[in-house]
Amino acid sequence: MLDCSWRSCWFNALELFSAVVHPFPENFGGTTEEMCLHVKRYPDWVLAVVVVAWGTTALVSTWIAQRIGNLGSSVPMRRQAAATGETQ
């Protein structure tokens, strides 16, 4: 099943960015040694951009999850407070 959530699209965009600015060599075999060498050759600015983008994704995802989680749990409390005349 195709996952089209905003997070998966964002992750794919990050991977595409990485592939465009620092593509695999033509004779890349996918071994652990080759992967380590490929990552070792990454330009520092690419790693900085990707780290900031992944960190932003984690922050935004956590914020959205917190907002969604608190939305449902806060509605009954507001109704109860309104029924009893309490203020929050």
Image: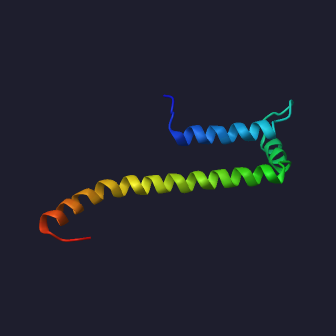
Instruction: List x then y, in percent, for residue 40.
Output: 84, 50
Outermost residue, left direction?
84
Q: How many marks?
A: 0
Q: Is residue 87 above or below residue 11?
A: below
Horizontal relation, residue 59 to residue 26: left or right: left
Quadrant in which residue 84 is drawn? bottom left
Q: Is residue 68 above or below residue 5?
A: below
- The image shows residue 3 at horizontal and vertical percentages of 51, 33
Q: Residue at image x 44%, y 53%?
A: 65
Looking at this view, is 46 or 75 the one in front?
75
Q: Is residue 32 above or below residue 55?
A: above
- Residue 14 x, y percent position in the rendering: 67, 42
The front one of 35 and 31 is 35
Q: Which of the 4 image quadrants contains residue 86?
A: bottom left
Report the colour scheme: rainbow
What x and y, as percent, mark residue 75? 26, 57
Q: Residue at x 79, y 43 (%)?
A: 35
Name the residue located 81 percent from the left edge and 36 percent from the top edge: 23
Q: In this view of the protein, which residue sits in the foreground, 57 or 79?
A: 79
Give me the residue at 15% from left, 69% from top. Answer: 85
The quarter of the picture where the C terminus appears is bottom left
With respect to residue 21, does 27 lie above or below? above
